[in-house]
Image: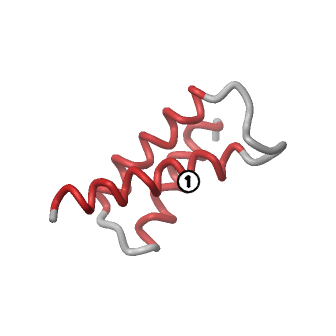
Amino acid sequence: MNPTDFIFKNITDLLVKDGYSREIALASANVGVDEYYRRPCPTQKGKIFDDCLDRAKKHAKGLIKSTH
């Protein structure tokens, strides 16, 4: 599994586990993968996944707010 597949799969799984719909989780996982490509380095050593997950969670919350 390459890094982008890992990020996409795990973000999707975590967001669904947190109660987000599959559609929101998938859209937000794509945002997390985009974050991986945008960052030249993580905020802390070895924390790139956490940075991607944080960005995906913010996106998911924004999608929830925009639908209400």
Q: Residue at x 66, y 52 (%)?
A: 50
- Farthest residue in the left direction? 68
Query: Which color mode does the image show?
Result: secondary structure
Q: Quadrant of residue 23?
A: bottom left
The quadrant of the image that shows the N terminus is top right
Nearer the observer, 60 or 4: 60
User: Can you give x and y, in whole percent of width and height, for residue 48 in the image?
Assistant: 70, 43
In the image, taking residue 26 as reference, residue 18 lies left or right, namely: right
- Report the residue marked by disc 1: 54
Count of numbered circles on the image = 1
Kind of residue sitting beneath label 1:
Asp
Q: Is residue 68 above or below residue 50?
A: below
Q: Is residue 49 above or below residue 65?
A: above
User: Can you give x and y, in whole percent of width and height, for residue 58 in the image?
Assistant: 44, 54
In the image, taking residue 46 as reference, residue 12 lies left or right, namely: left
Other-residue count near label 1 (Cα within 10 Å), few / some / many at <14 / 14–19 / ≥20: some
Secondary element under disc 1, as helix, strand or loop, is helix
User: Can you give x and y, in whole percent of width and height, for residue 66 in the image?
Assistant: 20, 55
User: Can you give x and y, in whole percent of width and height, for residue 14 in the image?
Assistant: 51, 65
Q: Residue at x 36, y 50 (%)?
A: 26
Q: Is residue 25 above or below residue 4?
A: below
- Farthest residue in the right direction? 45
Q: Quadrant of residue 67?
A: bottom left
The quadrant of the image that shows the C terminus is bottom left
In the image, taking residue 65 as reference, residue 50 lies left or right, namely: right
Q: Residue at x 31, y 61 (%)?
A: 22
Q: Quadrant of residue 60?
A: bottom left
